[in-house]
Image (tube, rainbow, N blue to C red):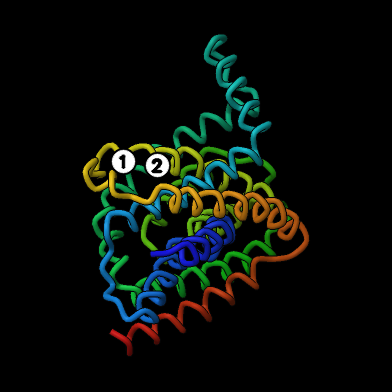
Amino acid sequence: MGYLEVILMGIVQGLSEFLPISSSAHLVFTSNICKLVNGSESVYNAQEVFLDIVLHFGTLVAVLIYYRKEIWQIIKALCFACKNRDFSAPDAKLGVYLIAGTVVTVLIAYPLHDIAEMLVFTPMIVGVLLTFTGFLLLFSEYISKNILDKKEAVDWKTSLLIAAAQGMAALPGFSRSGLTISTGLLCGLDRNTSARYSFLLSIPIILGASMLYPVIKLDLHEAAQFDFLLLSTGALVSGVVGFFCIKYFIKFISKFSLKVFGIYCLIVGIAMTALFYFVK
C-alpha cells in the first residue's frame, strides 16, 4: 500500500462519508479494485484495517470543524439544562435526541459487527446493498415531494428512527448519510434539517469507533510496524476533502433533490455486483 493508493482512498472517504453514496462501499470497491489491478489477494492486513479507522477520523475532524458553533451551543444548552433540570430549550432537546440516538445506533450496530467485517471480503454483496441505498434515496425523495407541511425540527420518533437507520448502516453498502437523510425525509423533515441532524449524529459514533478500535483490537506489536506518515496523509486528505464536501453538499441539497445520488448508487451498485460476481 503506497501513498497514491492512500491519497485515493482519502479522497474517496472524504467525498463518500457525507454524500449519500456509502463511504464503506466505496472503500471496499476501491481497495478490491486496486488489488485486482495489482494482482494481489483480497486479504486485509492490520494496517489496512487501521487505515479505514484513520480515514473516518479525518472526516470526523471535518464535521467537528464545520459544525463547531452548533456543537458548542448544544453542549452549553445541555449543561444549563442539567443544572436547571429544564430540557425545554431547542438545543437541549437536540442534545438529548443525539445522546439517545447514539445509544440506539450502538444497540443495532454492535450485533452487526461480525457481519460487517465479513462483507469487506464480499464486495458483490456490498454492491447489492448499495443498490438498495439507491432505491431508498429515490423512494424517499418521491414521498418527501408529496409532504407539503415539512418539519423543521427533530422530534423523539424521528430521532430514534434516524438512529435505527444509522445502526443498519454499519453494514458496508448501506450509506450512513443516505439511510439517515432518507429516513428524515420519510418522517417529514426538510432536506437541510435531515442532513444537519444526520451529520451531527455521526460525530459520537465515529468518535467512539476511532477511540475504541485501537484499545480493543489493535495489537501494539503490529502497530509498531505501521507507517504513521502514510496513515496521517490519508487522514489529512479525507479531512480536507470531507470539510469541503459538507460545505457544498449542504448548499446543493437546499436547491436540488437527492435523485442524482440515488441513480449513482443504482449504477455503481449494479456494476460492482456484476463485476465481482464474474471476477472472484
Nearest the viewer among 102 and 36 is 36
Q: Can residue 186 be seen here?
A: no
Secondary structure of the residue carrying numbered label 1: helix
Categorize mark 2 by other alpha carbons within 10 Å: few (<14), some (14-19), many (20+).
many
Nearest the viewer among 243 and 85 is 243
User: Picture coordinates of residue 16 (x, y %)?
Assistant: 54, 61
Point 59% across, 45% down: residue: 62
User: Relative to residue 184, is residue 155 depicted above or below?
Assistant: above
Residue that mark 1 sits on: 214
The quarter of the image holding the N terminus is bottom left
Point 65% across, 28% down: residue: 90
Point 51% across, 40% down: residue: 203
Residue 65: image quadrant is: top right
User: Picture coordinates of residue 44 (x, y %)?
Assistant: 28, 63
In this rendering, would 43 be left or right of 100? left
The quarter of the image holding the C terminus is bottom left
Q: Can residue 233 be seen here?
A: yes
What amino acid type is highlighted by mark number 1? Pro
Dot label at residue 194: none
Total labels: the figure holds 2
In this rendering, would 83 be left or right of 114? right
User: Picture coordinates of residue 130 (x, y %)?
Assistant: 45, 71
User: Relative to residue 77, is residue 111 depicted above or below?
Assistant: below
Residue 114: image quadrant is: bottom left
Asked if disc 1 and disc 2 are in contact, CB closer than 8 Å, the reply is yes
Categorize mark 1 by other alpha carbons within 10 Å: few (<14), some (14-19), many (20+).
some
User: Picture coordinates of residue 69 (x, y %)?
Assistant: 68, 31
Residue that mark 2 sits on: 210
- Could you give the CA–CA distance between mark 1 and mark 2, rounded to whole angstroms? 7 Å
Farthest right residue in view: 255
What amino acid type is highlighted by mark number 2? Ser
Farthest bottom residue in view: 278
